[in-house]
Amino acid sequence: MEYLASLLLAERTVALAEFHTYHHDQGFGVNNRLLMDAQAMKHLEVFEVEANNKLTTSGSLYELLNR
């Protein structure tokens, strides 16, 4: 939020978002999950990494956690 505020984008961006409080003691359930859009997953390199203008799974977050 601080980063978005520094770019003067916080008010426009937050208005489009939907936030819910996460309670770790409730465990996993329908209302207790993290949702990411495709753009966030791309930037976080969850499943694919772009290297030398090619997409590869090597070095992705999923590959790292799946060891």
Image (spheres, rainbow, N blue to C red):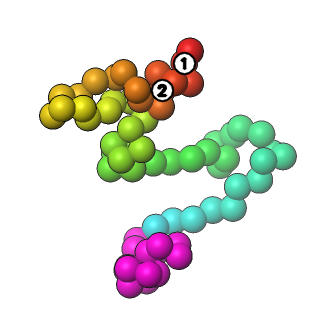
Q: Residue at x 71, y 38 (%)?
A: 28
**Residue matched to label 1:** 66
3D distance between C-alphas at marks 2 and 1: 6 Å
Nearer the observer, 42 or 13 = 42
Compared with residue 53, is residue 32 higher up or lower down, i.e. above or below?
Answer: below
Within 10 Å of disc 2 (Cα), the crowding (few <14, some 14-19, many 20+) is some
**Picture quarter containing residue 59?**
top left
Residue 46, percent across and down?
Answer: 43, 35
- In the rendered image, residue 7 lying in the magenta stretch gets the answer yes
Q: Residue at x 52, y 73 (%)?
A: 1
Label annotation for residue 62: 2
Q: Residue at x 56, y 15 (%)?
A: 67
In this view, which residue lies farthest toward the front?
Answer: 52
Q: Is residue 57 left or right of residue 54?
A: right
Compared with residue 46, is residue 64 higher up or lower down, i.e. above or below?
Answer: above
Dot 2 amino acid type:
Tyr
Nearer the observer, 6 or 16 = 6
Q: Residue at x 26, y 34 (%)?
A: 50
Which secondary structure type mostly characterizes the magenta part of the structure?
Answer: helix
Magenta residue span: 1-16
Residue 51, percent across and down?
Answer: 24, 32
Compared with residue 39, is residue 12 higher up or lower down, i.e. above or below?
Answer: below
